[in-house]
Image (cartoon, grey):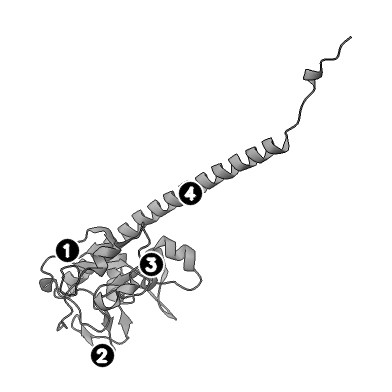
């Protein structure tokens, strides 16, 4: 009786094995790219919402402080809202401003202000990439009012829909003189929130091409409390 040689099983050749491995590698690469894009898209939504929330708190702060937005920096003894400050703090440490974000009184620990809220509002990309060294809003967003300037009043903002308040950045301030601090993390664009509360991506060309007198940058005259 004849034995059918074709019925014998035949294993993969080296070429076929390499082709399969290459196909798997391509699929893994495509999957990783899709996951990265989804993560970036999700981060952009989170950051946009964070910036809107921060500026909403800024608007509410101004309503409670005679039309004055949160000061970029407060020194000991400086009068804010009718009361002298007892601690120096920047905008992201200001207890009145933090209270507006929380819709409740800001809490403090033995080491200072409770930063758990700040961490929750940080840029997710920053949290993932620099979690060991950055635990504050200052590493995610920059205030467009310079640190050495006085607070801006609502009456000084001629065009709130075109004047940026906060923007994605690597430092607490991203004023005209320190545009290098602005972080273009999302498709080569930064995300800015304007004084009217809306947020949108802004290209590097838009930022580098804007002058200090453009509507994008708020006025920097010192405001009297």
- Residue 33's disc is 4
> Is residue 130 or residue 53 the one in the foreground?
130
The residue at 46%/46% (across/down) is: 34
> Is residue 188 or residue 197 the one in the foreground?
188
Dot 3: element:
helix
Question: Taking the image as drawn, is residue 57 in sight?
Answer: no
State the residue position of label 1.
162
- Name the side, left or right, on which 71 lies relative to 36: left
- The Cα–Cα distance between marks 2 and 1, rounded to whole angstroms, is 34 Å
- Residue 77's disc is 2
- The Cα–Cα distance between marks 4 and 2, rounded to whole angstroms, is 53 Å
Dot 4: element:
helix
Instruction: Say few, some or many: other residues with alpha carbon within 10 Å of mark 1 (under 14 / 14 to 19 / 20 or more).
Output: some
Pointers 4 and 3 in contact (CB under 8 A)? no
Determine whether 196 is above or below 73 in the image.
Answer: above
> Is residue 168 or residue 86 the one in the foreground?
168
Instruction: Say few, some or many: other residues with alpha carbon within 10 Å of mark 2 (under 14 / 14 to 19 / 20 or more).
Output: few
State the residue position of label 3.
117
Determine whether 122 is above or below 146 in the image.
Answer: above
Pointers 4 and 2 in contact (CB under 8 A)? no
Q: Position of residue 62 (x, y in %)?
A: 18, 71
* First of labels 3, 2 by sequence position: 2
* First of labels 3, 1 by sequence position: 3
């Amino acid at each position: 009786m004849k034995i059918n040689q074709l019925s014998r099983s035949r294993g993969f050749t080296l070429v076929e094995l390499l082709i399969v491995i290459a196909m798997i590698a391509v699929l893994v690469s495509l999957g990783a790219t899709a996951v990265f894009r989804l993560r970036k898209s999700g981060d952009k939504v989170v950051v946009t919402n964070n910036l809107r929330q921060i500026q909403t708190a800024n608007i509410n702060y101004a309503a409670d402080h005679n039309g004055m937005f949160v000061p970029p920096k407060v020194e000991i003894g400086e009068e804010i809202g009718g009361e002298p400050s007892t601690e120096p703090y920047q905008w992201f440490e200001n207890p009145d401003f933090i209270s507006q974000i929380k819709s409740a009184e800001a809490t403090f620990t033995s080491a200072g202000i409770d930063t758990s809220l700040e961490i929750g509002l940080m840029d997710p990309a920053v949290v993932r990439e620099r979690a060991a060294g950055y635990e504050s809003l200052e590493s995610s967003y920059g205030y467009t009012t310079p640190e050495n300037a006085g607070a801006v009043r609502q009456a000084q903002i001629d065009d709130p829909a075109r004047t940026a308040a906060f923007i994605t950045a690597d430092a607490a301030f991203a004023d005209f003189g320190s545009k290098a601090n602005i972080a273009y993390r999302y498709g080569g664009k930064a995300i800015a929130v304007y004084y009217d509360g809306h947020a949108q991506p802004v290209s590097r060309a838009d930022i580098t091409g804007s002058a200090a007198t453009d509507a994008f940058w708020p006025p920097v005259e010192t405001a009297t409390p």
